[in-house]
Amino acid sequence: MLVRDAGEFRLIELLAETLAAEGAEGQDFTGTDAPKPLAGIGDDAAVWEGEGGTRVLTTDAMVEGVHFELGLTRWRDLGWKAMAVNLSDVAAMGCLPTCSVVTLGLRGNLPVEGLVDMYRGMAEACRSHGGRVVGGDVVRSPVFFLSVAMEGQANIKGPDGGGAILARGAAEIGDVIAVTGSLGDSAGGLRVALAGERFDDSTGRLHTAHFRPEPRLVAGQELARAGIRAAMDISDGLVGDLTKLCEASGVGAAVRGDDVPASQELRRRFPDEWLSLALTGGENYELLFTGREETVRGVSESIDVPVTTIGEIVEATHGVRVMDVKGDTVDAERGGWDHFVKGPAGE
Amino acid sequence: MLVRDAGEFRLIELLAETLAAEGAEGQDFTGTDAPKPLAGIGDDAAVWEGEGGTRVLTTDAMVEGVHFELGLTRWRDLGWKAMAVNLSDVAAMGCLPTCSVVTLGLRGNLPVEGLVDMYRGMAEACRSHGGRVVGGDVVRSPVFFLSVAMEGQANIKGPDGGGAILARGAAEIGDVIAVTGSLGDSAGGLRVALAGERFDDSTGRLHTAHFRPEPRLVAGQELARAGIRAAMDISDGLVGDLTKLCEASGVGAAVRGDDVPASQELRRRFPDEWLSLALTGGENYELLFTGREETVRGVSESIDVPVTTIGEIVEATHGVRVMDVKGDTVDAERGGWDHFVKGPAGE
């Protein structure tokens, strides 16, 4: 079987099964201090109980021609985004970033000035959202790629005294489903950029959402503090990511399509497609979470971004469905982004 | 300026300067728990004081056609080596591995069975040397690459009560210079493989050294316990790496070429070139360290691998020189591996 036939999600499953079967827990060299994994492959970040508390480790890579094009993105924005997508994973776990390392795979004909500017963008993201770049590796590669690995730490104590961690598998039937911010702007911004259009006042918000996303670190902290337990960041599109959350939790979801938040800018620029973009567009980096209705209401009052309730967690047999006002199921092009099938830059 | 003109080491310098100038220490979100970096970009791993003790974070990437060829290496060995090079960095800091994440950049036409076997090799390395794979990221890429990021923890207490960390910048004039194991076997193994020769009993050691290197974790622990402070792993060749250690410490080095340890297998297979391979061959993953003569003597008795004293740390003005028995300077093709200039697979 080839990678392209297996697809990203099946492949990750197979690799995780391999590690489990092979006992990749490793030799217990450190005695009583051996890390105890709490959530593993498949969540936004891996979580373990280390000395000094609950820690997370996440990594995200971006490849030229697959995740970005140098002709479309500014170097500084590329650096910002490389950090932001990892910061978003840390935020989605309810943690704060500590340190990160950057791997660069570089073609020899890339401009050093561009790379320096990219690092300025990384530093900007650290200044705005925390964490620091402490090291990395630079290697030669025929294709330009960058990969960031970031460590984070649980900063909020849970009811059991351990770190309060947000996870995909904690949604419960009867929970309401909520999201931060508005959805689809990033996918809209990518479309505008790929069409070769200049961004102006009416589309600037879409540009920012795609090229300079804001990770929701403060919001993630608020969720953990309020006692929310189920969350993830929306990197592959609302419907695809909600499906993953439901599968991890063994539940289903009923989403009211008309309640899905979309910006005026997105609705105006894509009058026929905004809902589809909001439901399936990738790289949002907003937080998707579930919880008791009163908890979610409390959170939406204390948090620094808009929170919108979009549906309910239901029995698994219901599946994940988006409905219109009449209660009919909306075909939302389920599945999200499988990077081996379609990517922002196509192939 | 292009990357190929700047070269790897100058580029890393520039990027590190950018982070320092931009204040990439990041916003202090965590209050008193903000990580305090102790050693940053340029050492084998970044070190910081986190909650629960001294921690390190390192990353190493391997790119098809640059660091490996699928026609030459077995999938399982590739997985082993990807973990081993990171484990070696953790060992060189005197630490033990906790958790790691793996980033895969995959061509769609790679065989899934190969990748599963590669993960088996990663699990084997974890079982043998500690740590575990807790997560990762899989992305589409026109060129196959894998990048591992690994966290480690100082396990030995230093005289000040903090973690005893080995670092490049701690060599002092009057120290003796020592290495573990024998050098050049990996470079010899690569030559044999590139020549298309089959490995046999007389060259099996060279094959293992290149394709399945053993990280020196136990040795690294012994060094830290004995009070050794200056060490690094030899990934770019003895002379190149010793030069980096001397530059970081502000000292020079006088190496006795005839004392550099090389295996019988290497000497027999490369009768004219073994010394050059031992002095400059990359990917050894043995430990290079310096310390007081009596400390090094004590270590060589307690450690699980052969330790050879090969020279002395001297004044910086002396530079880094390798001498033959007559005291004449050996031209060791100084510089080590700059992956933008020459790599194992050429370009």
Image (tube, coloured by chain):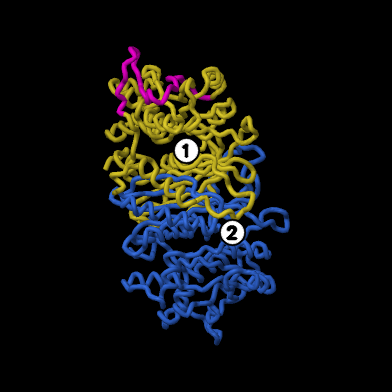
Chain colours: A blue, B yellow
Mark 1, residues whose alpha carbon is within 10 Å: few (<14), some, or many (≥20)?
many
In this image, A43 relative to A52: left or right?
A: left
Q: Amino acid at mark 1?
A: Asp
User: Which mark lies nearer to you, 2 or 1?
Assistant: 1
- Specify start and end residues of the magenta stretch as a single range: B304-333
Disc 1 designates what residue? B44
Give the answer, above or below, for where B310 lies relative to A54: above
Q: Residue at x 33, y 12 (%)?
A: B326
Residue A140 quadrant = top left
Q: Amino acid at mark 2?
A: Met
Answer whether residue A143 is magenta in the image. Answer: no
Task: Locate residue A10, reporting x and y percent.
Answer: 47, 59
Give the answer, above or below, for where B308 lies relative to B83: above
User: Looking at the figure, which quarter contains the N terminus of chain A?
Assistant: bottom left
Give the answer, above or below, for where A74 lies relative to A188: above
Residue at the extreme top of the image, as rendered: B326
Q: Residue at x 29, y 20 (%)?
A: B271
User: Looking at the figure, which quarter contains the C terminus of chain A?
Assistant: bottom left
Mark 2, residues whose alpha carbon is within 10 Å: few (<14), some, or many (≥20)?
many
Residue at the extreme bottom of the image, as rendered: A326
Q: Nearer the viewer, residue B26 or B189?
A: B26
Q: Which mark is residue A93?
A: 2
Q: Nearer the viewer, residue A125 or B299?
A: A125
Chain at tag 2: A
